[in-house]
Each structure stands twice: as structure tokens, then as C-alpha cells.
Image (spheres, rainbow, N blue to C red):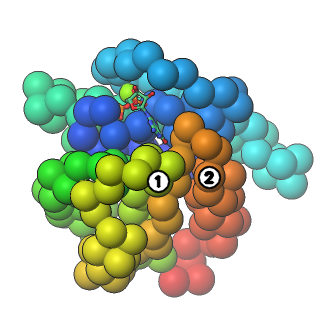
Amino acid sequence: SRDFRVVVLGSAGVGKSALVQRWVRGNFREAYLPTIEDTYRQALGCSHKAGALHITDTTGGRRYRGLQRLAIARGHAFILVYSITRKQTLEELKPLYELIRQLKGNNPQKCPVILVGNKCDESRREVSEKEGAAYACEWNCAFLETSAKMNINVQELFQLLINFEKKPAAAA
Ligand code: GDP
Ligand code: MG
């Protein structure tokens, strides 16, 4: 099929579900609903011949490493989310990034990763934009700061993914 599977990864509470909800449904809720794994299917434009964007919203819990591994193995592109209000959540992405590279190889064109610093609406910041960008540079991936709450850069984030999908991997 022409489906393109995007996997959203990161620690609990960083706003993975909020980002996906914002994009898929256009809303935001304050209440925290722990996720195990949810999948969303969004049809791509008519030029995509029945293709769809599949978004897998994963859980951050260590107990679900097996599910995470499986989601990564099946994924075509990855969104790694941390919260700019908690430095630890950025550090916790490192093993996930390494697992992606281990399972998918080192070619960023074939397997794009986007690093996302969410909750950029918050004033109690622990991670500067510069620091986030430095990680992205080291990992050779795209970088965006977002707010699911205030709807900042959410459209841009998913548009980046859709653009990756349109570029044939063979061009790499
Ligand atoms: P997940 O565990 O990564 O899926 O995190 P959730 O999407 O469930 O969000 C965790 C908490 O952070 C919830 O209380 C959300 O309302 C809140 N949250 C999510 N995104 C944002 C954001 O962009 N800004 C702010 N201020 N809070 C957010
Ligand atoms: Mg969630």
C-alpha cells in the first residue's frame, strides 16, 4: 500500500497525544489521559491514490518497550517529543533515537526524524531553543518547537512529514 506510518515517541506527559489530537481533531484538552497506543489514519491528498498517513501515538512507559520497538520497526518517519519545561524528557529521547537508528539504519533521507520541543507556550522553561537545536544537529534531524495548547507549529510539523512522504526515498 502507499501508506506512510509516522510514530510519535517520547516520555509520558510531554504532549504527544495533545499534538496528534490538535492536528487530527483541531482541539486541546487540559486533562491528562494516559495512552497505551492509539493509531490515527488521515487520508493524504487525492494525488496519493488511496494512501494514508498513519500516526501511531505511543506510550512513554518503560513497561511498553516491546510495543515501542514494534512501532519503530514498522514506522517510516518519527516524531521525538520532549517538553521544554523538563530537561529530563529531552535526555530520555536519546535511547529512543538510538533504537531508531539501530532498527532503521543511518540514512536520514530514508527514515526522517523530527525533534520536537513541545509546550513552548510555557514560561517555566528548562530547555532553551538553542539546546534543542544542538541535539537536532547532533542527530542530523529536523527541529521545531511547538505548542499543542496554543496551536503553534503543529500544522508545520505534520506538513514536514507530508513533504517527506512526497519525496521518493530513492532520491537519497
Ligand atoms: P503524552 O503523555 O505525551 O501523550 O502527553 P499528553 O498529550 O497527554 O499531555 C500531557 C499534559 O500536558 C496534559 O495535561 C496536556 O494538557 C499538557 N500539554 C500538552 N501539550 C501542551 C502544550 O503545548 N502546552 C501546555 N502548556 N501543556 C500541554
Ligand atoms: Mg499520550
State how far apart marks 1 and 2 are (Cα): 8 Å
**Mark 2 lies on residue:** 152
Residue 165, position as x, y percentages in the image: 63, 61
Rendered image quadrant of residue 171? bottom right
Q: Nearer the viewer, residue 126 or 137?
A: 126
Picture residue at 18% right of the left edge, 29% below the top:
61
In the rendered structure, which disc, 1 or 2, sits on the residue that comes first in sequence? 1
Residue 155, position as x, y percentages in the image: 68, 52
Asked if residue 59 lies left or right of residue 119, the reply is left
Residue 41, position as x, y percentages in the image: 63, 31
Judged from the image, the quadrant occupied by ligand 1 is top left
Q: Secondary structure at mark 1?
A: loop
* Residue farthest to the front, as pictured: 123
Q: Are marks 1 and 2 in contact (CB under 8 Å)?
A: yes
Picture residue at 30% right of the left edge, 80% below the top:
134
Looking at the figure, which quarter contains the N terminus? top right
Q: Is mark 1 within 8 Å of ligand 1?
A: yes
Q: In this picture, is 44 found above or below 102?
A: above
Picture residue at 88% right of the left edge, 47% below the top:
46
Q: In this picture, is 111 found above or below 24?
A: below
Whether residue 113 appears in this view of the structure is no
Q: In this picture, is 99 found above or below 139?
A: above
